[in-house]
Image (cartoon, rainbow, N blue to C red):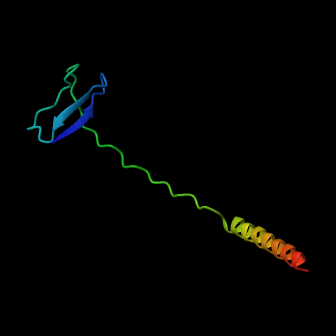
């Protein structure tokens, strides 16, 4: 199994074996010593809510008004 490490000196990607045997690995392109650094953990951001309570009530109100308007139109057509 190999772990890719990027050289800080030249930017080349090097594949290293998981067991190094106590030796310091060097870059295959420029010969600079490679230092294995742990990558920072990914940051999780909370997902934004879809609608706030006020926006939800507004949508329900507009929908209710539209339905009553359609009901009145339907009743006018019947009579």
Q: Residue at x 71, y 64 (%)?
A: 55
Residue 43 lies, in percent from the top left, at 43, 51
Res. 32 image quadrant = top left
Residue 1 lies, in percent from the top left, at 15, 42
Q: Residue at x 30, y 23 (%)?
A: 9
Residue 33 lies, in percent from the top left, at 21, 27
Q: Would residue 18 be found to the left or right of residue 68 on screen? A: left
Q: Nearer the viewer, residue 15 or 77?
A: 77
Res. 4 image quadrant = top left
Q: Quadrant of the C terminus?
A: bottom right
Residue most extreme to the top: 30
Q: Is residue 5 above or below residue 79?
A: above
Residue 30 lies, in percent from the top left, at 23, 19
Q: Residue at x 69, y 68 (%)?
A: 56
Tag count = 0
Q: Would residue 56 be found to the left or right of residue 2 on screen? A: right
Q: Residue at x 11, y 41 (%)?
A: 19
Q: Nearer the viewer, residue 66 or 39?
A: 66
């Amino acid at each position: 199994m190999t772990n890719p490490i990027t050289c800080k000196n030249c930017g080349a990607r090097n594949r290293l074996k998981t067991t190094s045997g106590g030796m310091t690995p060097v870059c295959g392109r420029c010969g600079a010593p490679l230092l294995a650094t742990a990558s920072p953990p990914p940051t999780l951001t909370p997902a934004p809510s879809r609608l706030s309570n006020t926006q939800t009530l507004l949508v329900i109100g507009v929908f209710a008004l539209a339905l009553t308007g359609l009901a009145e139109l339907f009743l006018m057509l019947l009579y």
